[in-house]
Amino acid sequence: MIRVCINGAVLEPEGAKVSALDYGFLYGFGLFETLRVYKGKPFALKEHLERMEGAAREIGWDFPWDLRTVREWVSLTIEPFGEVDLRLRLTATPGRGEPIADPSTCREPTLVIIASELPRDFDRRIERGLKVVLFPHPRGSFASRLKSLSYIESVLARSFAREKKAHEALFVNHRGIVTEGATSNVFVILERALLTPPLELELLDGITRKFVISLALEMGLRVREEEFGPDAFHRCEGAFLTNSVMEVAPILSFEGRSLPQSPLVPQLRKAYREMVLSRVGSELPHRGLEFTP
């Protein structure tokens, strides 16, 4: 089942439409966030909206919705699913404007919320590990750190991964340094320390990435944000990907070569899930009750 909400109106997917003059459609001018709903309760909605607001400022757009409004619309969208796990996508654009590439002409901004059920075996598949390949075209620009609707690089990288019978593709920049996955952040384990590319490489400041770094430090692990190349996968003790839906996903192989499976990865995955369950109860209020954003 899929549910769609556009500016607070819940619609059947087939009838959910935006204008052909919407700047998200015309120019890819807009932003999106994807998060996970656990048993009917979204996790880290506030953090995702804060990131979206920050990205809006970077592109010169005044983000018009407050947390209270978005939470209410999210509640309307996910309520019929009951206590199941969902993928939740928020897509925001400045709305309809003149077809002259000038966002100042836009009126009535658009916020689309799409909720869809995760497969029942989703977590088991992630726990088994993912096959990862290297995308052959370099990445690294201002827009890379934004979750913008101009997502063609990531779509092409994911298509490349599927062609190679893999689950995810990693990007490198023009210097051959690993930056991130098409839809994920990446970590390698060397000498029981977690290495992850620094944000200065113009990669996405992942919400799950932040949580995992914090959890690793609480567990007494060393974490280093530093550059590394693809050769790091040939000498690592393990590696994993993070994003809000798959959480912490072990990398089973890189470029067809099996990787060691560090016990730290399931430990981090377990710690992350425990942290989520401890917090998720306060993420979404019951309908009709007052709450503090």
Image (cartoon, grey):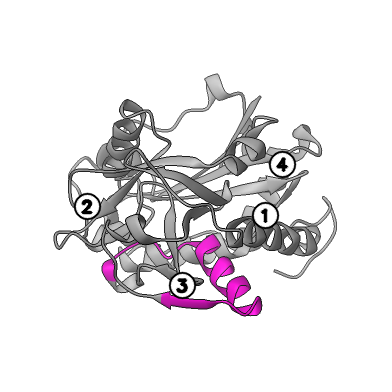
What residue sits 61% from the left and 23% below the top?
12
Corner quadrant of residue 230: bottom left
- What amino acid type should be assigned to the residue bearing mark 1? Arg
Query: Comparing marks 2 and 1, which lies closer to the viewer?
Result: 1
- Given the image, on which type of amino acid does mark 3 rest? Glu
Q: Is 189 on the left-hand or right-hand side of 125?
A: left
Residue assigned mark 4: 76
Instruction: Compare marks 2 and 3 and give the one earlier in the sequence.
Output: 2
Q: Is residue 201 left or right of residue 45?
A: left
Where residue 200 sits: x, y (%)? 29, 73
Instruction: Identify the element where label 4 is drawn.
Output: helix
Point 27% across, 40% down: residue: 152
Residue wearing tag 2 = 102
Distance from the alpha carbon under mark 3 to that under mark 1: 42 Å
Which of the two discs, 4 and 1, labels the residue nearer the N terminus? 1
Lower sequence index among marks 2 and 1: 1
Q: CA distance from mark 4 to mark 3?
A: 47 Å
**Farthest-out residue, left:** 174
Cα distance, mark 2 to mark 1?
A: 30 Å
Secondary element under disc 2, as helix, strand or loop, is loop
Give the amino acid at mark 4: Leu
Can you say which quadrant of the picture contains the C terminus?
A: bottom right
User: CA–CA distance between discs 4 and 1?
Assistant: 9 Å
Q: Which stretch did the figure color magenta?
A: 201-224
- Mark earlier in primary sequence (4, 3): 4
Q: Earlier in the sequence, mark 3 or mark 1?
A: 1
Q: Which residue is mark 1?
A: 71
Give me the disc on residue 136: none
